[in-house]
Amino acid sequence: MKYLTALASTSLAFLAMTGIARAECGNLTIASMNWQSAEVLASLDKFILNNGYGCKADVIVGDTVPTITSMIEKGQPDLAPEGWVDLLPDVVNRGITEGKLIGAAVALSDAAVQGWWIPKYVADAHPDIKTIDDALKHPGLFPDPEDKSKGAIHNGPQGWGGTVVTSQLYKAYGAAKANFTLVDTGSAAGLDGSIAKAYERKLGWMGYYWAPTALLGKYEMVKLEHGATYDAAEWKRCNTVADCADPKKNDWPKDKVQTLVTKAFADKAGKDVMDYLNKRSWSNATVNKLMAWMTDNQASGDDGAKKFLKENEALWKAWVSPDAAAKIKAAL
């Protein structure tokens, strides 16, 4: 009888401790930004936190500027898995300095990247082409769809920051003198379509694109090196200014994409939850491939999260505690 009483007391104590652990995490809101990589990462965090750590997480719709501003000023949402901090560095730094924000893991281990790309089959066939200058020596490999006697550099639609930079780099690298035209693809769909058409016909293509994206998960591309060191002052003065007449060669800076957590949630969440949020990070190649599958299958962020968890156990197990790993696996 004493044994049973002791056993019951121990069980009650365990349940009480479990309840406390769950209460520490409690309710939380996770911001899903209005693009695919952020959507699937928010869904992934929701699944792992709910099933592995006993949280009660809900995903809400967000966007970079209003979400991060709200986290600082209102303490909500609790978590922004994919915060593009370079878009508003002063705001993020103020939030961290004032003790309202915590910077957790870098969500994209190799950062978000923009630049000029060529198909991998072209890069494999011409290993001498590593940089923009290298590619500009071969206009015949990247034919203009309207004039085969010239090479082409495909640009994004008007209104994009990347379109302005590409136009400026076109001047800086002397692409016109190298017999290249700058092609206005007109829209995001037009830009995507030009890559898809080239890839399906195994033609040469060169132009602006970025990662992470579903398209680069479907069509393997190689980013050209710029052959220049990043000069922040020059980037601000001219590379990003459409009417600047004398742009210089410059590297394209990577964008830091970091998970942001409110200080209030970090304080109550508990060590295990924050350990996870400080470790969880994936590469562009991983998320590109996942987004390509989501696009082809019209899958939701929740669908993508489950597919990732089922197929990448070795990766995500390194982010979580052994106890959480067992619970997550059981929930799949």
Image (tube, rainbow, N blue to C red):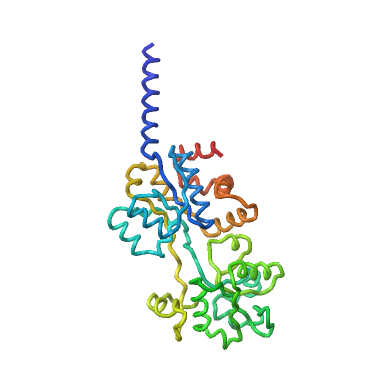
Indicate left or right for 239 with 188 as reference. Answer: left
State the quadrant of the C terminus.
top right
Could you tell me residue 54's position as x and y percent? 44, 37
Q: Residue at x 61, y 86 (%)?
A: 179
Q: Residue furthest bottom?
A: 177
In front: 31, or 274?
31
Could you tell me residue 206's position as x and y percent? 60, 75
When the figure is inspected, residue 65 is found, relative to residue 28, above or below; the finding is: below
When the figure is inspected, residue 331 is found, relative to residue 303, above or below; the finding is: above
Quarter-of-image position of residue 203? bottom right
Could you tell me residue 181's position as x and y percent? 60, 82
In front: 76, or 4?
76
Q: Residue at x 53, y 61 (%)?
A: 212
Q: Residue at x 65, y 84 (%)?
A: 150
When the figure is inspected, residue 24 is found, relative to residue 185, above or below; the finding is: above
Q: Residue furthest left?
A: 98
In front: 147, or 71?
71
Could you tell me residue 234's position as x and y percent? 40, 79
Q: Residue at x 30, y 60 (%)?
A: 94
Q: Residue furthest right?
A: 201
Q: Residue furthest top?
A: 1
